[in-house]
Image (cartoon, helix red, strand yellow):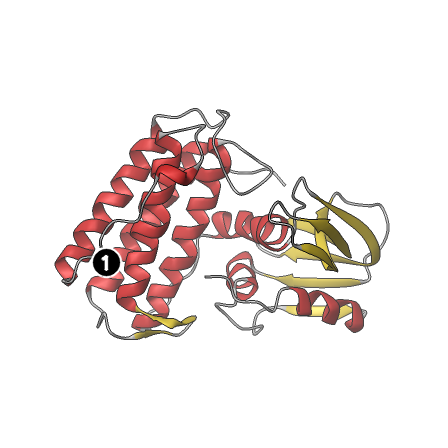
Amino acid sequence: MTQLTHDLYLDHIRNESQRFRVVLADCDLEAQVPSCPDWNASDLLWHLGMQVQDFWAWVVEHRPEGPDGWSEPARPDSPAGLFDAFDTATARLSAALESADPTEHAWTWSADQTVGFIGRRQAHEALIHRLDAELVAGTVTPLDPTLAADGVHEVLAVMYGGTPTWGTFTPGEGLLRFDLTEAGEAMWVRLGNFTGTDPEGKSYDEPDLNVVAEPGVEPDAIVTGPSGPMDAWLWQRGDEAEVSVSGDRAVYDRFAALVNNPIN
């Protein structure tokens, strides 16, 4: 699947962040976030602004240095202070990404150590947290279909799949195809097993998945739906109402068990 350009990701960061702010400005900041039940709306506002956007702005500004030099600022006590901090963080991230070449080296938690990875990741952070804000307000609007199609690939390939340099993915039985109806895109997921020992010494041996190229064989299961509802569903921000499954239900159930973990 062809990814969006760095400039388009940056446009989406700005647009989704603005929508996020507008929605929360009309909310009770003490209201619980349905998709992140440990948070209220003020926690969500602080999270996207300072814990995410300010953090990644610092990483881009100080590339290729790691994040050890960043420290979380003191959290304001007032709503006005929270919104001011959010505005500053969004502007800082936008400026940092706008001035950087997406191919430049920058620290990330991924095997992809580039500014471009950060730009793409932050577009989807803003998109999904905008949806969180709308769930608080009860005013959910459609996700941009092109960004959401990219988001389906990103959540499967990066957030649930992907293999760190210290681990190994061993393909196993079970192949799924994801058909995004209005986008005309298809993505393939292979089930398998992940093993490895992380830098802190923790060992893993567990079921996993990876996005793969079209393998030239029929899938065991097919998951079909529009990109927006599919992206929201994979992020545990929507239901299966517009998503259909055909084929081997046992293969799909194994996949569903792997992604049944909400991501904040």
Residue 91 shows in the view: yes
Question: 240 and 260: which one is in front?
Answer: 260
Q: Which residue is mark 1?
A: 22
**Left or right of residue 252: residue 227:** left
Q: Position of residue 192 (x, y in %)?
A: 79, 56
Q: Position of residue 58 (x, y in %)?
A: 34, 37
- Count of labels shown? 1
Kind of residue indicated by mark 1: Val
Q: Where's the C terminus, which quadrant?
A: bottom left
Q: Where's the N terminus, which quadrant?
A: top right
**Residue at 38%, 65% in the rendered image:** 132
**Residue at 69%, 49% in the rendered image:** 197
**Left or right of residue 147: residue 56:** left
Question: 217 and 108: which one is in front?
Answer: 108
Question: 104 and 214: which one is in front?
Answer: 104
Farthest residue in the front direction?
201
Q: Position of residue 97 (x, y in %)?
A: 37, 32
**Left or right of residue 118: residue 212:** right
**Left or right of residue 227: residue 161:** right
Eyeballing the image, is 117 above or below 80?
above
Q: Secondary structure at mark 1?
A: helix
Question: 11 and 36: which one is in front?
Answer: 36
Residue 191 shows in the view: no
**Residue at 14%, 62% in the rendered image:** 78
Q: Quadrant of residue 140?
A: bottom left
Q: Quadrant of residue 131?
A: bottom left
Eyeballing the image, is 101 above or below 215?
above
Tell me if mark 1 has few (under 14), some (14-19) or many (20+) residues whose alpha carbon lies within 10 angstroms of its own: some
Q: Position of residue 87 (x, y in %)?
A: 22, 47
